[in-house]
Image (cartoon, grey):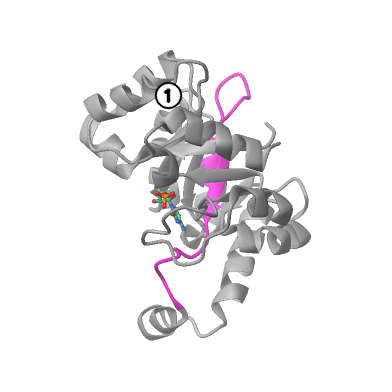
Amino acid sequence: MGKDVIVALDFDSKEKTLAFLDRFTEEKPFVKIGMELFYAEGPSIVREIRCRGHKIFLDLKLHDIPNTVKKAMAALSALDVDIVNLHAAGTAAMMTAALEGLTRPDGTRPLLIAVTQLTSTDQERMERELWIERPLAEVVMHYAENAAQAGLDGVVCSPLEAGAVHERCGENFLTVTPGVRFADGDVGDQKRVTTPAKAKELGSDYIVVGRPITQAEDPAAAYRRCREEFIG
Ligand code: C5P
């Protein structure tokens, strides 16, 4: 898979989601289904969107004992999605088990990427609540390396971290990066944002874009603009 824009389907119902997708008459964007939509509608929403011809990043961030994650990943793999994810904090044993569970009888599997530290966790909370007393940027890089060593395909990170992740974990280790805004757009609750063009320059492999596309007056036009800036 090459560089692409992934549209975050942050909706709470099937109706809203399909009405949004119906607005794309010419293209079939790569989409991200997160916990909100998946827990509201269940696996059938994944099957329905797949049937419509979209590639899917299923963003469920698994974190449990290795055996449970392995079995859950097998169930997700059967949904024929393209990317799934987990928390690197679950350790290498959990990540390896996840890869085993994801691998289908014919040897194929969805890409597996890791969340390092959530962007909602800051240095102060990490030290005070998690008792991790290292600079946050080092922790992120260490977790990325753990994921690479366990055989995962990449991480979710900020475009600002993409270069460092590639340097440490290899050019082929994927960086899937949210926190993207148009230069003239609303930042919303995102703290550190980059434009699609800047994300390209910084080496992101996939950008995950939600509100700049979902809330746009013309989502298909916003999506095309995003692709144009990111892929060219
Ligand atoms: O609307 P917006 O473009 O901010 O949406 C970004 C998407 O990426 C949301 O689905 C959000 O949950 C997700 N995400 C994020 N930051 C992370 C991890 C995931 O914004 N660190």
168 w.r.t. 61: above or below: below
**Is 112 colored magenta in this rendering?**
yes
Labels in figure, total: 1
Point out the stretch of residues depicted in magenta. 97-122
Q: Identify which residue, 201 or 6, lies in the foreground.
A: 201
The picture places residue 199, in percent across and down from the top left corner, at 64, 52
Q: Is residue 7 left or right of residue 153?
A: left
53 w.r.t. 219: above or below: above
Q: Is residue 56 visible?
A: no
Q: Amino acid at mark 1?
A: Leu
Q: Residue at x 32, y 43 (%)?
A: 35
The picture places residue 175, in percent across and down from the top left corner, at 63, 50
Q: Identify which residue, 171 or 205, lies in the foreground.
A: 205
Q: Residue at x 44, y 21 (%)?
A: 24
Categorize mark 1 by other alpha carbons within 10 Å: few (<14), some (14-19), many (20+): some
The picture places residue 164, in percent across and down from the top left corner, at 71, 64
Q: Residue at x 64, y 42 (%)?
A: 229
Give the quarter of the image for residue 105. Answer: top right
120 w.r.t. 227: above or below: below
The picture places residue 136, in percent across and down from the top left corner, at 54, 76
Tell me the quadrant of the picture where the N terminus can be found: top right
Q: Identify which residue, 218 or 188, lies in the foreground.
A: 218
Q: Identify which residue, 107 or 30, lies in the foreground.
A: 30
Q: Which residue is mark 1?
A: 79
Q: Residue at x 42, y 15 (%)?
A: 52
Q: Is residue 133 visible?
A: yes
Tell me the quadrant of the picture where the C terminus can be found: top right
Label 1 element class: loop
**Is 115 colored magenta in this rendering?**
yes
Q: Is residue 205 left or right of residue 48?
A: right
